[in-house]
Amino acid sequence: MTESMRKELGVREGIKASTISPGVIGTGRADKVTDPVGRTAAREPNALAISPHSVADAVVHALDQPADATVDDLIISPTRQNR
């Protein structure tokens, strides 16, 4: 989908299109789960989560490219994430 948007908008209008796909992000959401079993399940992947700051840095990287370059797909995963 991003490539189609890039071709349609980028080629004709010079508008960039990027897909940024983060892995588990440490947002604190797991602490808000009220069910004890659900909270335990939610906390497990959060132990390896990347920070919101790391995701923001990646977004800035994609936006900070020169006018003649586009980051098409950027996948950001926690280094130690196994799934």
Image (spheres, grey):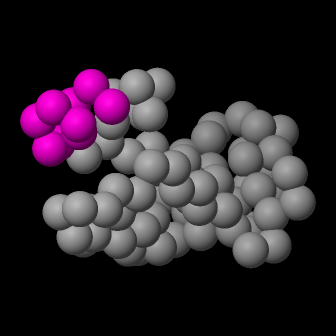
**Depicted 8 relative to depicted 80: above or below:** above
The answer to whether residue 73 is seen in the rendering is yes
Q: Is residue 54 left or right of residue 17?
A: right
Q: Residue at x 17, y 42 (%)?
A: 15
The answer to whether residue 49 is seen in the rendering is no
Which of the 4 image quarters holds residue 19? top left
Q: Is residue 48 left or right of residue 60?
A: right
Q: Is residue 4 left or right of residue 67?
A: right
Q: Is residue 12 magenta?
A: yes
Q: Residue at x 59, y 61 (%)?
A: 76
Residue 36: x and y, percent? Answer: 77, 42
Residue 25: x and y, percent? Answer: 56, 58
Q: Nearer the viewer, residue 43 or 10?
A: 10
Q: Residue at x 27, y 25 (%)?
A: 8
**Depicted 76 relative to depicted 8: above or below:** below
Overall secondary structure of the magenta stretch? helix
Residue 37: x and y, percent? Answer: 83, 39
Q: Which residues are magenta?
A: 7-15
Q: Nearer the viewer, residue 50 or 17?
A: 17
Q: Residue at x 23, y 39 (%)?
A: 10
Q: Is residue 18 left or right of residue 20?
A: left
Q: Residue furthest left?
A: 13
Which of the 4 image quarters holds residue 33? top right
Q: Residue furthest right?
A: 82
Q: Nearer the viewer, residue 43 or 9?
A: 9
Which of the 4 image quarters holds residue 61? bottom left
